Amino acid sequence: MANDPVRIERQVDPRSGEGRILELGHANAGRVLFVVWIPRGSLRRPVTAFDANRKTRAAYQGRRNEDRKHDLN
């Protein structure tokens, strides 16, 4: 995600041992997405992505607002 995503956590897949990154971010149209991807060298391999639910969207917007306030100080 190129629109300044918020990293939620990093997990390790128990079957493959690969690290997975979970992030929240927004598409250019403003849609808030929950995305899981695997780093492969300098590339990012998407695993899944879906629309964030209402509660998650609100938390994401709150975090972005806090980050913006912090950046202004």
Image (cartoon, rainbow, N blue to C red):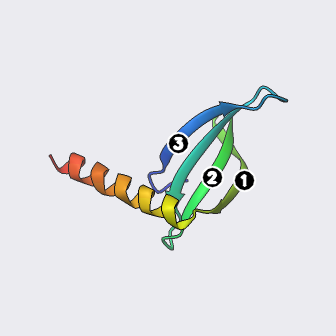
Q: Residue furthest front?
A: 55
Query: Of label 2 and label 3, which has the lower sequence position?
Result: 3
* Residue 29 on image: x %, y %: 51, 74
Query: Of label 1 and label 2, which has the lower sequence position?
Result: 2
Tell me how far mark 1 sits from mark 2, CA to CA. 6 Å
Nearer the observer: mark 3 or 1; the answer is 3
Q: Which residue is mark 3?
A: 8
Q: Residue furthest left?
A: 73
Q: Tell me the amino acid under the disc marked 2.
A: Val
Q: Tell me the amino acid under the disc marked 1.
A: Thr
Q: Which secondary structure lies at badge 1?
A: strand
Please name the residue shown 85% across and 29% down the image: 15
Q: Which residue is mark 1?
A: 48
Residue 56, compared with residue 18, is above or below; it is below
Q: Which residue is mark 2?
A: 35
Asked whether the residues under the numbered discs 1 and 2 touch, taking CB atoms below 8 Å apart as contact, a structural biologist would say yes
Judge the density around disc 2: few (<14), some (14-19), many (≥20) Cα neighbours within 10 Å.
Answer: many
Judge the density around disc 3: few (<14), some (14-19), many (≥20) Cα neighbours within 10 Å.
Answer: few
